[in-house]
Amino acid sequence: MQNDFRGHRSFIEAQQLTSAWLRPGSGEDYRLSQLMESPDGATAVATAVVCEALQGQPSTRIALVDLATGNIELLTRGPGSDSSPKWSPDGSSIAFLSDREQAQVNRLHILGIDTGAEHAGPQVDGFVESLEWSADGRFVLLCTAGFGSDLAGAQGAVAVSLERDAEAQADWAPTVEGAPEASPWRSAWVYDVGTHRVRRVTLPGINVWQASWAGPDHIVAICSDQPEETRWYTADVRLIAVENGDFRTLFKPDDQLNCVVASPSGDTVAVIEAVCSDRNLVAGDLRLIDVASGEVTSAATLDADVTQLIWRDEDTLLFGAGQGPDYVAGLFDRQTGAARELWRDSRRQPSGMIFPEIAPLGRQAADFLCLVEAFSAAPTLVAYEGGAERAIRTVGAPEVDARVQALGVSARDFTWTAPDGLALHGWLITPKGAGPHPLIMHVHGGPVWYVRPQYLGRSALLQMALAAGYALFLPNPRGSSGRGQKFARKVFGDMGGRDTYDYLSGLDALESQGVIDRARIGVMGTSYGGYITSWLITQDRRFAAAVPIAPVTHWVSQHLTCNVPTFCELFLSDKLGDPLGQYFTRSPIHYAERVRTPTLHICGALDKITPAGQALEFHKALQGSTDVETVLLTYPHEGHGIRSMPAIFDFTARVMAWFEKHMPGRTPDRL
């Protein structure tokens, strides 16, 4: 494989497809997120993704959306990215985060709506990760991370440092790890709008992963006593006094936590608990905590895995959840202890960066705002009011939508049965034309996560694969979200075990139905998907080509070099030193001599959660024990997954070239 791919036809096509979606230099938005309705109900503020040039990652701006006409006005101009907009309670201003001084180093900014005046909040010890106004509008709660903190896996799993600190460090000096004084901490701060001063709320020795207001005098937070990323897995819920930082532990969970929010009075705390692979990827059960008594109760949520919680009043929670192939929006009534379904769909689902996102709308608890999308339908801003949908605006470029429609693909929920009788589902996208088709199976990360419908127009790789005649299989095996905690736990302590046969039996079912060509089956995936890709080719020889991305290939070295060794212990249910245990028996490198599949290994040099050494080890193991073609790509400025331009064009081109070489599709349609 050549070193420079910039002249390759697939590199050029990936660049062209991405440009058509992002429209660099146009100043037009191509995606909205983090929606919040204005207090007067006329508009919504949102984070709009815009692209200035095909370099790095697209920037974001704060946008104002007219909920009657759908008109969008950009309120900020950068430089850098502006995000996380929140209306003040009186609607006079918007607080948001901006990294215009240094990429990824967010700082509080406040924009006056009537005056257009904008000012930055005071510097804090680190970078701001989230913000929330107090109910009276006098304060803004800030959750910050100290410089050197790791981003979550879904954010790229890289450490964020202050450039001037790095420049001041002597080039010969070592990096320090393991010394408590050298570890960055996460903390909570309060900004006083009237005095423009900020002060730290949480005491030393408390690491705050997430926090929100709990009445006027307290915050509720997900906390640990140590700052490392791996400590998140055993974090608890604490009530913290704003005045002096005194705290009381409210809930010590068995599993992981996310989305901690208090009712308007602060008397009741809601939080999601679930067995979980990565920070922020929590989909599971709703827990309610009575602050006065400390009583914790489980709430019924339509037998779905909850991903989002929003208090609508003291007794009512709006929630979003996954249930098999469906997205469900529901309303939980604390007085009756019952939930009712508001909206359900499988083909169309709300957009979101990690999970689908909805935003409260108006005064009726059951009304909400969201963008909905499907594999072949561009995101559309929709208001759900009084049980009916109202389309406000479609976001995206008409020429991209025309291209997607011209692909003529068919997308459907595909179900099959595993060898042990477990019912499974995934998504099957087939190109136009009669089968059997060459197939690329794309394995999701986690393992506790799931694949949902997302618009093909934003992915050059998927458009190119379908145009070249490849079918795409996106399975949700045991361990995936959306099927309840019992289903998620089926992969717990058994990674690479029975889920191996979930993938293989899915392929068997597709073959038996005449959908796919057995001689042209490829597999790829990122993170846990990279692990399974590496693992499957050691267990089965049907695969014509493989592309593991940010994989785990050796659980011992993964445990010792990654930033989340707790994950390894929990999900392997084993001890590092057991030579007969799963740290050894479930590591692909120990079976490298079995591999007959040409393998393209891909990793980012800055990845903290699945370090680049994992891909290197398996590549070297294949080189040393087989004659199979093996190529390693290490992107020097990337973390967990390839995210920035032009690296993403190179990645797309090399993946397409790999599959076209080893399992050719048809001549690509030039649409």
Image (tube, rainbow, N blue to C red):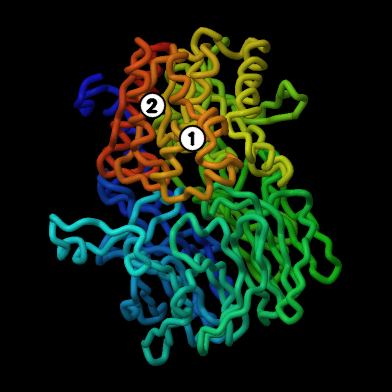
Name the foreground residue: 563 vs 662.
Answer: 563
The disc, 2 or 1, on the residue closer to the chain's N-terminal end is 1
Is residue 238 rendered to the left or right of residue 287?
A: left
- Name the quarter where the C terminus is drawn: top left
| Residue at point 49%, 73% (across, down) | 206
Farthest-out residue, left: 171
Dot 1 falls on a residue whose secondary structure is helix
Q: Which residue is mark 1?
A: 456
| Residue at point 33%, 58% (across, down) | 177
Q: CA distance from mark 2 to mark 1?
A: 31 Å
Instruction: Give x and y (percent) for residue 174.
Output: 21, 56
Question: Label 1 crowding class (10 Å Cα cut-off): few <14, some 14-19, many 20+?
Answer: many
Question: Label 2 crowding class (10 Å Cα cut-off): few <14, some 14-19, many 20+?
Answer: many
Q: Amino acid at mark 1?
A: Leu
Position above or below: 13 against 182: above
Q: Amino acid at mark 2?
A: Phe
Dot 2 falls on a residue whose secondary structure is helix
Is residue 344 rendered to the left or right of residue 472?
A: right
Is residue 582 rendered to the left or right of residue 302?
A: left
Q: Which residue is mark 2?
A: 618
Residue 324 visible in image:
yes
Instruction: Give x and y (percent) for residue 354.
Output: 52, 50
Instruction: Give x and y (percent) for residue 133.
Output: 51, 78
Residue 452 visible in image:
no
Instruction: Give x and y (percent) for residue 608.
Output: 38, 48
